[in-house]
Image (cartoon, grey):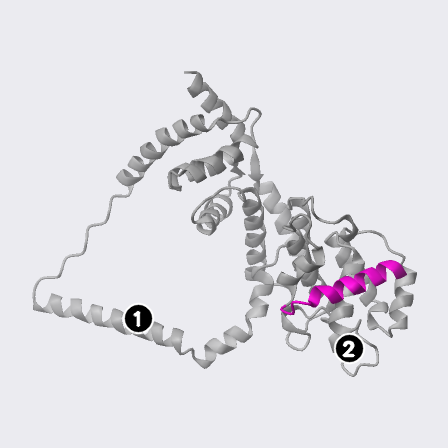
Amino acid sequence: MCGEFYIMDFLNQLKEKKIISQKDIDKFKSYIDEKYEAFGDEKKHAILKNSITYVVNRDLAELKIDDEEGFVSSLVQKTLLEDKEDLCADKILQKVVLEGEHSDGLLQSVTKWVSDKIEIPLHKDILEKYYHDHYYFDKDIALQENPALPLPTLPQGKASRWIFWCAIAIMIFLSVSTFKDTIFPSDNLVVIQEDLPQEELFKNTVPAYVLQKYHMPNRNFPHYLYYRDINEDDLKSYLSSRNSLLGKEPYFSQVLDTAKEFDLNPLLLFAIAGHEQAFVPQDHPNSEVMINNPFNVFGSWQKYNTNLKETSEIAARTVFNSLGDLPPFMDPFFWMNHRYAEDPNWWRGIRSIFWRLEKEC
């Protein structure tokens, strides 16, 4: 009886623990509508869904779920977007119990996850009892409501058999065609691949507002890479000595605004631009185009050229996400390298320029 009471108690506590609410999603929508005003509804919806997925993934990071992507995707699509319900911790637990495999690794991770959300830490035995009582009961109900479909039988009669074998032939033809297109892609597929960065831009975008509000602080994130006010006059003077277009407006302020938005030291973004494109010299014949992407996101400024505000946000987001899982005692510039650049020595140049700017400004 005591165990049953304790189970009800921790379940009630989990019901009060909101992972993400419809009010949160409404705020996301408002921010995205304003921030990405020029985007169509499809792109805005993709960014919204990606933002919601980011928040849910953040909360479930410690759970050892086999099909984590499918698990999270169904929560986002069904519970949050279709049913328009708040996502609370109890719903996640119920879904884990119904769909997860009964393993020691899963039980241990779920026990810790639940314990972090309730007043008194949960004992593994209590969770095992809850899991056992509900897993088999819910599975039986699911099987009764969704009985296995009968295997198709071979149609009788000559005409029916002819139709059946025609259907099989069509299926084989389609399979072979799909295989051929996969192995020997057509020109159209090549075009799609070339356009991939545009798709990746909105499908993988998580707005800075969401990153800042819901990111898990990393105690290893060095204090000197967080945003701070800098001596703008000194920085402009240094950029002027390099004949840099980045020292001119509106470019200078755009980089500063992005750094503040992502809580990053502005000198880090300027250091990346300094290493990638020598701070964009004004006398370079392509400086007016190069300034749109001095960070060489998506390969280079020649391949991807939109505007400075957009590319600075992509660069900042890449750095921010890279440092989010910075291990202890690891050089942050070295750690950024594996996500930002293919050149294994990229980090050395960035670090050198960053500390030079710190000294100057």
Q: Which residues are magenta?
A: 342-361
x, y percent for residue 346: 69, 67
Magenta part, dominant SS: helix
Left or right of 253? Residue 132 is: left
Residue beneath disc 2: 288
What is the quadrant of residue 56 in the picture? top right
Residue 91 appearing in the image = no
Residue beneath disc 1: 175
Tell me if mark 2 has few (under 14), some (14-19) or many (20+) residues whose alpha carbon lies within 10 angstroms of its own: few
In the image shown, does 20 or 95 lie closer to the viewer? Answer: 95
Closer to the chain start, of discs 1 and 2, is 1
- Up the image or down, 30 lies above or below 180; here it is above
- Circle 1: element type: helix
User: Does the magenta portion include 341?
Assistant: no
User: Does the magenta portion include 352?
Assistant: yes
**Which residue lies at the image location 84% right of the left edge and 81% below the top edge?**
283
